[in-house]
Amino acid sequence: MTLRQQLELRRRQWVAFNRWEAAHPASARDPGEILADLGAIWSWLPPEVRMEDPDPKKLGIRKMRAALAHLRP
């Protein structure tokens, strides 16, 4: 599959997802429930996956903090 074909496939997938999402709006949920769901999913991962640090230099956190600094008054 060429890159052009991959991009076209991805574009069609997004179109289909956006159409589905418009027909199925998300219900309002308590943030605590969402965090509980994330905690449950996290607990299903094997311990070796949970212990692995994909960003040991914490570059993602640095980028996030730099972006948030622009939002401060």
Image (cartoon, rainbow, N blue to C red):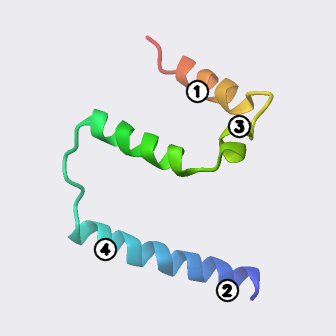
> Which residue is located at x 74 percent, y 79 percent?
3
C-beta proximity under 8 Å, tags 4 and 3: no
Disc 4 designates what residue?
Answer: 20
> Which residue is located at x 60 percent, y 28 percent?
64
Q: Earlier in the sequence, mark 2 or mark 4?
A: 2
Q: Earlier in the sequence, mark 2 or mark 3?
A: 2
> Which residue is located at x 23 percent, y 37 percent?
30
Q: Earlier in the sequence, mark 3 or mark 1?
A: 3
Q: Residue 32 at x, y = what percent?
A: 29, 33
Left/right of residue 17 with respect to residue 7 in the rendered view: left
Mark 1 vs mark 4: in front: 4
Q: Which one is in front, 43 or 63?
A: 43
Callout 4: 10 Å neighbours few (<14), some, many (20+)?
few
Q: Residue 61 at x, y = what percent?
A: 65, 27
SS state under label 4? helix
Disc 3 designates what residue?
Answer: 51
Disc 2 designates what residue?
Answer: 5
Q: Residue 21 at x, y = what percent?
A: 30, 67
Q: Is residue 62 above or below residue 31?
A: above
Q: Is residue 60 above or below residue 72?
A: below
Q: CA distance from mark 1 to mark 4?
A: 31 Å
Three-letter residue code for mark 4: Trp
Q: CA distance from mark 2 to mark 4?
A: 22 Å
